[in-house]
Image (spheres, rainbow, N blue to C red):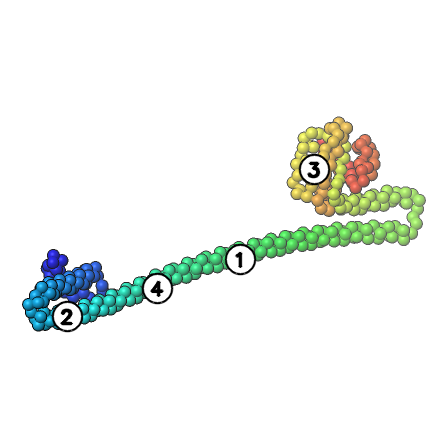
């Protein structure tokens, strides 16, 4: 009876069957009510037991009263049983409804969790796809930039090469035209000399040196415009001053296409300077323009100015140079 008293002392309220609003307090009240009902049924059964016992003891004294009491007892037991079964069914029904409500709530909560997880997974997949697309776009942009840069460099190199080739062709054409003009001039002079009427012997003897001088001047001019390329050897006639040799070397280094690759000989006996020309140039004209050079001419063999023989190595052209003292 102590639980009955505790139940009676609790606030008089009915437990809520709404599964969405079911709380711990409601659940506790509901369980206590079930326990109280069971206690009442047990008390009722205990009360019926003594009555039946009392009826049996007085069976002989009051059969009629016993039968009535037995009938009454059976009626009471039947009613109590019916009430207990009804109450039990109600309890089971309520418990089933609560279970279904809890199940529905759990399922809804699980669906909500699954939905949130799916949303997060979709968001992560979208973010990963965006990152991949950005990386691909960046890589594609870098590749396009590299291809454009390579195309630009190749185009600039091709354009530069074409310009250099064009300049070299123009320079060659100019030199050829100049040599052609010199050759034509020589032919005209020779034709004029041949077509002139014979003069007196004394006059012919006086004019021959003049013709020879003109031809020599034209020959020197043509030699100065001769083009040199590749390996060339400068033969410096002795004696050679050390200061002039150093100055000549510095002058040659000013030209990007002239490389000094070797030096041999002595200041007293003459110097051999090996050059490598990266393109075709009028080397004699370049040398004659230097303040350190007095004369420069194509080498064919020994000369009075230089006892050193010119180079005989195949593919190497020699130039005789006389430096100023």
Q: Does residue 268 appear left or right of residue 85 in this picture? A: right
State the quadrant of the N terminus: bottom left
Look at the numbered disc 2 and give the secondary structure of its residue. helix
N-terminal of the pair, mark 3 or mark 2, is 2
Q: Earlier in the sequence, mark 4 or mark 2?
A: 2
Task: Name the residue nearer the viewer: 129 or 183.
Answer: 129
Instruction: Bin the neighbour count of mark 1 within 10 Å (Cα to Cα): few under 14, some 14-19, many 20 and up.
Output: few
The label on residue 111 is 4
Q: Which residue, given by chain and number where applicable, does mark 3 sit on?
A: 260
**Residue beneath the point at 88% across and 44% down:** 208
Q: Of label 3 and label 1, which has the lower sequence position? A: 1
Which of label 3 and label 1 is nearer to you?
1
Q: Based on the displayed image, in which of its 4 quarters is residue 76 positioned?
A: bottom left
Mark 3 vs mark 2, CA separation in Å:
140 Å
Picture quadrant where residue 297 is located: top right
Q: Are marks 4 and 2 in contact (CB under 8 Å)?
A: no
Q: Residue furthest top?
A: 268
Disc 4/disc 2 C-alpha distance (Å)? 54 Å
Is residue 225 placed above or below 52 in the rendered structure?
above
Circles 4 and 1, Cβ within 8 Å, touching? The answer is no
Residue carrying label 2: 74
Q: Residue visible at 62% across and 54% down?
A: 154
- Helix, strand or loop status at disc 4: helix
Residue 309: x percent and y percent? Answer: 81, 33
Residue 140 - label: 1
């Amino acid at each position: 009876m102590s639980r009955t008293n505790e139940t009676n002392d609790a606030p008089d309220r009915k437990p809520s069957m709404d599964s969405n609003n079911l709380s711990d307090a409601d659940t506790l009240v509901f369980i206590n009510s079930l326990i109280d009902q069971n206690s009442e049924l047990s008390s009722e059964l205990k009360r019926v037991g003594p009555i039946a016992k009392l009826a049996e003891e007085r069976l002989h004294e009051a059969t009629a009263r016993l039968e009535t009491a037995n009938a009454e007892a059976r009626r009471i037991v039947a009613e109590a049983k019916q009430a207990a079964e009804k109450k039990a069914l109600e309890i089971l029904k309520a418990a089933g409804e609560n279970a279904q409500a809890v199940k529905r709530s759990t399922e809804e909560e699980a669906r909500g969790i699954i939905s949130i997880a799916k949303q997060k997974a979709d968001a992560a997949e979208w973010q990963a796809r965006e990152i991949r697309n950005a990386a691909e776009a960046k890589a594609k942009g870098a590749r396009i930039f590299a291809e454009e840069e390579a195309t630009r460099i190749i185009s600039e190199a091709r354009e530069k090469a074409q310009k250099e080739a064009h300049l070299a062709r123009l320079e060659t054409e100019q030199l050829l035209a100049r040599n052609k003009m010199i050759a034509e001039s020589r032919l005209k002079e020779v034709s004029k000399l041949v077509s002139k009427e014979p003069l007196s012997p004394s006059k012919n003897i006086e004019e021959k040196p003049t013709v020879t001088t003109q031809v020599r001047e034209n020959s020197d001019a043509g030699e100065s415009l001769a083009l040199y390329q590749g390996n060339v050897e400068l033969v410096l006639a002795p004696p050679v001053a050390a200061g002039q040799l150093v100055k000549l070397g510095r002058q040659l280094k000013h030209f990007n296409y002239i490389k000094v690759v070797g030096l041999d000989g002595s200041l007293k006996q003459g110097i051999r300077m090996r050059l490598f020309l990266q393109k075709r140039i009028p080397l004699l004209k370049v040398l004659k323009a230097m303040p350190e050079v007095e004369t420069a001419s194509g080498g064919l063999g020994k000369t009075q100015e230089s006892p050193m023989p010119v180079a005989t190595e195949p593919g190497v052209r020699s130039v005789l140079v006389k430096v100023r003292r």
